[in-house]
Amino acid sequence: MDAKTPSTGRSGAFESPPFKFVGISTFLHAAFVEDWSNVDIGLIGVPYDGGVTNRAGARHGPREIRNQSGLINKIHHRSKLAPFDLCRVADLGDVWVNTPFQPEMAIDNIADYYSRVHAAGIVPITAGGDHSIVLPILRGISAGRKLGVVHLDAHADTSPGRWNFELYHGGPFRMAAEEGLIDPHRTIQIGIRGATAVPGVWQYSIDSGMRVLEIEDVREMGLNAVIAEARRVVGDGPTYVSFDIDCIDPAFAPGTGTPEVGGLTTFEAQQLIRGLQGLDLVGADVVEVSPPFDATGLTALVGATMMFELLCVVAEATARRKGVQPKSARA
Amino acid sequence: MDAKTPSTGRSGAFESPPFKFVGISTFLHAAFVEDWSNVDIGLIGVPYDGGVTNRAGARHGPREIRNQSGLINKIHHRSKLAPFDLCRVADLGDVWVNTPFQPEMAIDNIADYYSRVHAAGIVPITAGGDHSIVLPILRGISAGRKLGVVHLDAHADTSPGRWNFELYHGGPFRMAAEEGLIDPHRTIQIGIRGATAVPGVWQYSIDSGMRVLEIEDVREMGLNAVIAEARRVVGDGPTYVSFDIDCIDPAFAPGTGTPEVGGLTTFEAQQLIRGLQGLDLVGADVVEVSPPFDATGLTALVGATMMFELLCVVAEATARRKGVQPKSARA
Amino acid sequence: MDAKTPSTGRSGAFESPPFKFVGISTFLHAAFVEDWSNVDIGLIGVPYDGGVTNRAGARHGPREIRNQSGLINKIHHRSKLAPFDLCRVADLGDVWVNTPFQPEMAIDNIADYYSRVHAAGIVPITAGGDHSIVLPILRGISAGRKLGVVHLDAHADTSPGRWNFELYHGGPFRMAAEEGLIDPHRTIQIGIRGATAVPGVWQYSIDSGMRVLEIEDVREMGLNAVIAEARRVVGDGPTYVSFDIDCIDPAFAPGTGTPEVGGLTTFEAQQLIRGLQGLDLVGADVVEVSPPFDATGLTALVGATMMFELLCVVAEATARRKGVQPKSARA
Amino acid sequence: MDAKTPSTGRSGAFESPPFKFVGISTFLHAAFVEDWSNVDIGLIGVPYDGGVTNRAGARHGPREIRNQSGLINKIHHRSKLAPFDLCRVADLGDVWVNTPFQPEMAIDNIADYYSRVHAAGIVPITAGGDHSIVLPILRGISAGRKLGVVHLDAHADTSPGRWNFELYHGGPFRMAAEEGLIDPHRTIQIGIRGATAVPGVWQYSIDSGMRVLEIEDVREMGLNAVIAEARRVVGDGPTYVSFDIDCIDPAFAPGTGTPEVGGLTTFEAQQLIRGLQGLDLVGADVVEVSPPFDATGLTALVGATMMFELLCVVAEATARRKGVQPKSARA
Amino acid sequence: MDAKTPSTGRSGAFESPPFKFVGISTFLHAAFVEDWSNVDIGLIGVPYDGGVTNRAGARHGPREIRNQSGLINKIHHRSKLAPFDLCRVADLGDVWVNTPFQPEMAIDNIADYYSRVHAAGIVPITAGGDHSIVLPILRGISAGRKLGVVHLDAHADTSPGRWNFELYHGGPFRMAAEEGLIDPHRTIQIGIRGATAVPGVWQYSIDSGMRVLEIEDVREMGLNAVIAEARRVVGDGPTYVSFDIDCIDPAFAPGTGTPEVGGLTTFEAQQLIRGLQGLDLVGADVVEVSPPFDATGLTALVGATMMFELLCVVAEATARRKGVQPKSARA
Amino acid sequence: MDAKTPSTGRSGAFESPPFKFVGISTFLHAAFVEDWSNVDIGLIGVPYDGGVTNRAGARHGPREIRNQSGLINKIHHRSKLAPFDLCRVADLGDVWVNTPFQPEMAIDNIADYYSRVHAAGIVPITAGGDHSIVLPILRGISAGRKLGVVHLDAHADTSPGRWNFELYHGGPFRMAAEEGLIDPHRTIQIGIRGATAVPGVWQYSIDSGMRVLEIEDVREMGLNAVIAEARRVVGDGPTYVSFDIDCIDPAFAPGTGTPEVGGLTTFEAQQLIRGLQGLDLVGADVVEVSPPFDATGLTALVGATMMFELLCVVAEATARRKGVQPKSARA
């Protein structure tokens, strides 16, 4: 018996089985690897939602994004970027949070994991999980740098702690700024909207110097101006992209914990991500996909699509940093 | 035992329990009251759908709008209006329709209820129910005035009676005009669309002097021009806002009885409501939310959000009428 | 204006509006009260699921059980018990857990609440929430007594702590026994089944003297013998009934966090509860109804129905303790 | 061009297209006919739910039962009855209720239709619609006879009128008995259960001499004894079978207006219907299938299956009355 | 008995029963006919999805589009076209594919059917089915002409064969061009988007001279320019319109086999179809509606609506070809 | 950087992450392997449904069974069998069907794969896919033996070919018998039911000597007698178990292509599988799980549970054949 029997488990999942529903699910058909020594970009799941204040469920996000990844192909139809040709991209599996009842320890687990990812020279693209995970991700990868941030979200997530607790999904960007992980002056928040429980809940964003574009600002300015403004704000420095799925309108992405009507379309979100091409992107995430509230799987499909859009621009940046000339595939 | 044990039943639902899924559901977290003597604005459910010609289910609308209200906060992110600070807002419960098999009596029940609401000096914001309920609401609150109307809908609802019956959801605005409850010349209908069963089904709108903007007109004019036109039409007089959820595209609000594709986005609907700030608003409704056709609850969430948007502009008008200077909260 | 305007908010919800979908939702149509001084049996929601190890969502259980309560009437068709005639039954609202990120504090919150319920002389019937809440409920109401327990569940929930944590939904009955809140020799567990992660996970049940009937035992013995055995085990002493919805097969109750196929039918579960009539019942719960996994609302309806079945036998016991002769209504 | 082009519209739908999802949907693949002159058994839809007191939706029942009919074949696997070989069976379309807002007129419409069906010598098998339609059906077909009735249901439907109205789905069998359309002493009600709103709501059943078997009676007696009792009660006289889908447990048939947990399994229901073979069956119905509450279509499939089971025993009786010797097909 | 008993089976379905859920479902309420001798436009179902490479289900499309047709009326609200007044429109039933396991034979079946439709002088409007059916439709109706094509889709469907197979839904337009059924220079593809599996997968479109507008092109040009370009490309010659439902964003039309986020809105799609009025339209289709992935029926409703939009412009063209002056109804 | 970084990708998935929703999904948490040299039992997916005659979708079965496997633990609660301790169990991934449009070639692909599995000394447990795959599985593993078969199903699947095609899911057991892969006299079919399209469709079963127990026979005999009969029929020889999910009632397992109401409960199915312990089991499958028709995931959970039940008895047999003494774990 030949041990190299062709299989549809993971490797070569793209070329081999003709149909998208075949084989074990990984992010965007990437091979799952346990050996991190040959990876440029790591696709990582963080199935943790211990920071939500309303509807839980984002813990199931990575699994469903992997499933819906089956529908995604590999060459970008517009930019012609082929990220799997530009970089060595792998699915690293999920972060192992073994203290879910103690958020402090969970956050430390995640931060430790990302420190090792960073130490391995891997650029992470994460599927959450709730938005509280962006704090330990930033702790793990900032490495003394103050990162710029392009933050797409319905909520600014710069609230002070509530109920004797800080590590919830409403405040990670405040904490990250206070800890010096990000530079508020190189941070832009796009798509903010929705009634607030208390006045000034997002005041920290303004006071710290972040650029805040509410959804109404986005529509008034137009997408091109928003993209230009984002590029201006983050500049040439290392930049992280955090994509909360609730930046998108719940008609397009209903499966999330705190939906706000009146949001971005998926088309707009795609344009915004594509507009970041050429920046010095050092990591990205898609968070708050909550499958229990996603009856049709559409939100996970949107999550997988946005993960692909992010992969394209992050791979282009990563290849550039490595001195590789990103060549366009002709789709 | 202290009878004033803190509870999460109804009062203080906003401040007290940190999470939105806690406590008995009321409209927008308002306290439910049985004593009407200290209420400026009453949030009222009318669980009646005896006027539908196709798919029933709007009878369950108030309940699900109350449920989805859990996701709504209290300070408007754009206008900074904080309606609960401007006015005394309460959930008055549901209208008691005890003759559902006799539409004539049901309509009389509802009209009688709203007469008492009006007599109590309460401005009503209603969650339906099908659109036939707007006739008895107007009978109850017009009080000899011919009200202006901003009517958002896919259907003009000015059809003559059918099948030996007038009190159905296709004709209330014709009847209201004929009864002198509303002024057709101060009435604007926005978002009308969809094939019709007979020619001239909405001819009454035109003939009576109403301003009719089909969805194509809305897109051609642009939102700002539509808002300006609405303000021009209704002018300074007392004005009622009737919001049929099917004005919105079924991608955003699938749970309704007679969906018509190609409608408004929720963002557009929000802008239209906000554009009414400053008018002399004397009541409003959100009708035709039909939970049995709303698999994900999204339509009820949209309904609750629109109810909040309406509450903001109605509260501003109500406070103004009372001589209160609406102060903006800083969200 | 008469402040006593008939309303469909809460009181008299049964008699007044003819239809079940009218009015603000409470448990089984009971009046919501904030004054505990005239209550014999309190229906209480505990919207907390901080103890789950897999799929969260039971935090939304009380709200949906209230909603589905609309379908339940008030006189038992078989026993003719009319609990609202036997006792003063009220919906007390939800327990106010304001430290959801610190399970230890949440559990203390709940225990404190039930101590006050007990001090007020109120017999509690609870809608969870996950099963970890039964520990603080028992802490609140055991009052120095070692209670007997009839425990219906797919899992024995007597596991030791995991991941440096004890207060999860897999171990409350072990902790309750160790704390002397319940008497293992007067405890019976019915419906246990499903593969286990480690050997002897439920060994504590056996070692401590609990009677464990796996689902196969139930089917082999027959319902009548199971009921007899349950009555024999708990005897005449004060007894608590804990009903985990996952004792029922997921075909009948899919909306739960850790479903196990091959369970009880709802008919069987109803017979088991009815078989407890005449015992000295001092409290009961229905836990683990998880609406995000309950696409059709069926599980919440089953939960509401079981809550009604429990109310009937608990009301009969409560009336008996008060010296009232339970009279049967003729349905 | 040959006008007799083979089509998959309606005729020969069984033999022709190999797959069940092809062609215009009719009940059980029967040909739709407008000419009633060659029909023994008519399959009829009554899309009317103007008699429901809670959740509407049964108006959509006929359409979805037709759709799910695609999954049903034509020879009974157990009895070997092949109803389409025994009788001329046709889909007659839907009853044309053009006064839905006036229940009295609607009921008259239906009664008139069934009078014509009866006059045409057609035995009707009806898909409802809510249970109020059984009254006009019986008015149309009793023809001076007092029919026996086998009534499967969770509710006895012999309640007095409520809210100044009699023609609702809670009382048709009381009215039918009072009008002399059915013989209470030849009527058996099977599967009754569920809490009641008022004492003695079904007292009329007992007082008039109907045999009432609650679900607990069914389980205690066993199916064979129930069948024997049903045959004893109705005897040799002409008998109608009324099948309310809510006799079945909502796990098996969730899509109905007033579900009651703890009901029959579909297997039990099938046995009960088959047990009626040989009686003098003169009509049957399947009512209360409510598609808006039937997320998966399962209830409509159950409805179609029960319609087929009824068709088999009704066709056998019809063939017998015509002097045809029912021959078994060998499946 | 009068054989002309009014029925709600099919004919006069529009005028007769007041409600849309009554009667046997046909496309857009058209009468189903087996005699093709008096038909101008035939509405045809092709329940075949043997050409899909990912998620099957479009075989159920015709049935659900017929069902959702119940919600569509008959006079266009904007163009005032009343297609049933302009032409004799009938539902011809489904194409009878009796060799589903042999795609080659199935495709031949379909082509043969459409040859006969064409020979009968009937203009076909088809509800698929997957997109592979457009090849045999074109084979059947091109009749030696090279048709122009307006093709709305997320995918260009001009791929070469894969896996030793050509007759799949990714390549029909390449095959049609190669066979001379369509003129690539008179073909425009609108809405193309989404990552591709291999470079140059749609290269045939470019190389053969088709005009390809990706979704980004559509948004940049604006709808009016796109319509003008489509009219320029197809010119005055005979033109076919092929509408793949996945041209629309999955928020609006989730029920399809290969959804691509970031697509057209239904409003945009409606405008594009209306913009074709006046062209020499000789046939049209709506394909890839896949009910198993359409939890709410919304996609089938969109499909039915687009079928109505296509019927309006095709009927106008057909009437014109017959020398009838299309008169506008006044809606 | 240590390449052996703990991961939650696949290995040790059981012990390591405390929660079931973490990590890449495999069947029953088994490690996915590409090297077949250390595997006793292979869990294999066959995502192929090219043999269905009605509703497709079983191609998605393996993926969803892997997902729902997250809820399954590893030690059987009743038999105490711990299959992962008894044997080396691995997930081998999916069979690579690269000719889906040519069923003949697809069937050959599958047969070839299973020949290699058999040559590697691996006992296969398969998740389908439709039931046509059992033919190539048997071709691959029968190895000149005539296998006994325990076949649980609603349909006997011994039909002759239809529409010029034999390789469909209605006939694999006839073909297997004709090819000498199975011994009809050592074959038992359990749970058969449902109307048939033509007389004698399953006559081959009877004529060839198979033992056929319809569902009514199962209920009349009782489970113990059915188990005894199954053991008598297959005797001591090598035996395959084929489990079509539609043997189970659609209330418990709605997500399948040809549901038949009135089927087994999951409890009954579990008992039947457990009753096979001790036989010489050489392979097993679970087929016809069709996720597009499984709105809640329940059917896939049932599929995963039955796969675990089969794994327990197959592992016991495999260990026995290897001379290992199956030791019970103490659950």
Image (cartoon, coloured by chain):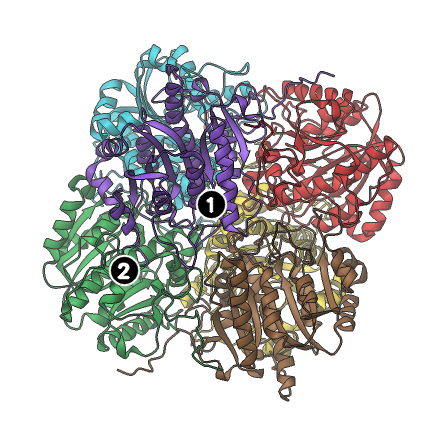
Chain colours: A cyan, B purple, C red, D brown, E green, F yellow
Name the amino acid, label 1. Answer: Ser
Asked whether the viewer can see residue A56, the reply is: yes
Q: In the rendered view, does D176 fall on the left or right side of E305? A: right
Q: Chain of mark 1?
A: B
From the viewer's perspective, is residue E240 above or below residue A321? below
Cα–Cα gap, marks 1 and 2: 46 Å
* Badge 2 density bin: few <14, some 14–19, many ≥20, Cα 10 Å: some
- Where's residue C227, x and y in %? 83, 45
Q: Residue at x 77, y 66 (%)?
A: D226
Question: Up-down: is F148 above or below A221?
Answer: below
* Quadrant of the image containing the N terminus of chain D: bottom left
Count neighbours of disc 1 (C-alpha within 10 A) and say few if under 14, some if 14 to 19, many if 20 or more. many
Q: Are marks 1 and 2 on the same chain?
A: no
Kindly report which numbered mark, 1 or 2, lies closer to the viewer in this rendering.
1
Q: Position of residue C300 (x, y in %)?
A: 62, 41
Q: Tell me the tag on residue E161.
A: 2
Q: Secondary structure at mark 1?
A: loop
Horizontally, residue B73 falls left or right of residue E216, namely right
Identify the residue position indicated by label 1 in the image.
B290
Quadrant location, the C terminus of chain D: bottom right
Q: Which residue in the rendered view is the most extreme toward the front?
A: B144
